[in-house]
Image: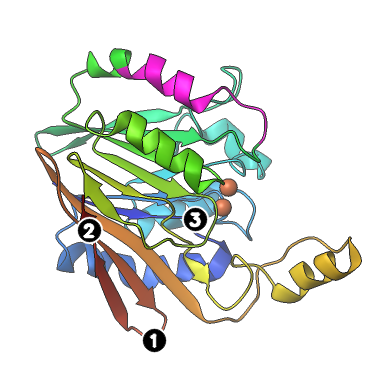
Amino acid sequence: MRVGFIGDVVGKPGRKMLAKYLKQLRKEHGLDCVITNCENASHGFGVTPKNAGELLHSGSDLLTGGNHSWDKKEILEQMDTLPLLRPLNYPDAAPGSGYKMLQIGDKKLAVINLMGHYCMPMCDNPFVKIERFLPGLQKQNPDHIIIDFHAESTAEKQALFYMLRGKVDAVLGTHTHVGTDDLKIDGGSVYISDVGLTGCRDNVLGMESQIAIDRFLQGYGTHFDVPDTCKAIMQMVVFTLEKGCEEAYKLRIYDSGEIQRQEAYRE
Ligand SMILES: [Fe+2]
Ligand SMILES: [Fe+2]
């Protein structure tokens, strides 16, 4: 099966890129399934039910989240009904689920959303949580397991990957909004520290640059905002799963329509 994975979609510029390009990319790259991180999809903070519907309509099958999953309160009561995950290692009392088993043709694909510890809100230790979670998941006989690891630190992301290499098919980083160039296949598993944002590429993490600059200059500032107009980018990792990950590459789609493709390296 061939999977597309899109990192943090930031605001309307990000949603517009999916609406414009994703269905066409699904056809051209033969994608059986697309997973999209939506924690910043609604004006940079959380996702509303309407915007979640938009991302699904654009060609996403499942949405994942992160520390911003909770920002739009109206989504909370729909977390159990929409194809939408929040990190697995939040307290059990939090609404929603941290994993989902998708049926893709005759294959079962388990998708897990996990959040890092470093610079993140209070949550269970992701390493301990996933180690305890996987044996129960294996009993449901998934053909493949993918993890969206929503974390700040590249070292934390690499450590989780090396702990799970060969046990899961993919560890794909989200949260920093800055794409890294370390897409690789190692021990049958695919890894990237961060897929990078889909949204404004010419601003700070997809948000208005001047607000970020003011905050650093003054020590205080206004609420972050997504620019109305900007140069946009869409970033998606594509990978093929058979016996583990057999092929992987990353696409950078510019709002001009230009597409750059980067192949994964192999250890
Ligand atoms: Fe984010
Ligand atoms: Fe985040």
Q: Is disc 3's CB within 8 Å of ligand 1?
A: yes
Residue under label 2:
265
Mark 1 and mark 2 in contact (Cβ < 8 Å)?
no
In the rendered structure, which amino acid carries the disc numbered 3? Asp
Of residue 47 and residue 198, the one placed in the foreground of this image is 198
Mark 1 in CB contact with mark 3 (< 8 angstroms): no
Q: Residue at x 44, y 73 (%)?
A: 233
Look at the numbered disc 3 and give the secondary structure of its residue: loop
**Label 1 secondary element:** loop
In the image, residue 190 above or below residue 201: above
Q: Which mark is residue 256?
A: 1
Residue 111 image-quadrant placement? top left
Write the start and end of the magenta stretch as one range: 121-134
Q: Is residue 171 left or right of residue 121?
A: left
Camera-side mark, 2 or 1? 2
Return the x and y of residue 77 as percentages of the image width and height.
58, 31
Place of residue 46 in the rendered image (x, y in percent of width and height, measured from the top left): 61, 48
Q: Which badge, 1 or 3, is on the more N-terminal residue?
A: 3
As measured in the structure, the alpha-carbon distance from the residue carrying label 1 to the one carrying label 3 is 20 Å
Mark found first going from the N terminus, 3 or 2: 3
* Residue 173 sits inside the magenta stretch: no
Residue 131 within the magenta-colored segment of the rendering: yes
- Image height check: is 251 above or below 106? below
Which class describes the residues within 10 Å of circle 1: few (<14), some (14-19), or many (20+)? few
In this rendering, the label closer to the viewer, 3 or 2: 2
Residue identifier under label 3: 8
The main secondary structure of the magenta stretch is helix
Q: Label 1 sits on what residue type? A: Ser
Q: To which quarter of the image does residue 212 belong?
A: bottom right
Rendered residue at 35%/57% (across/down): 182
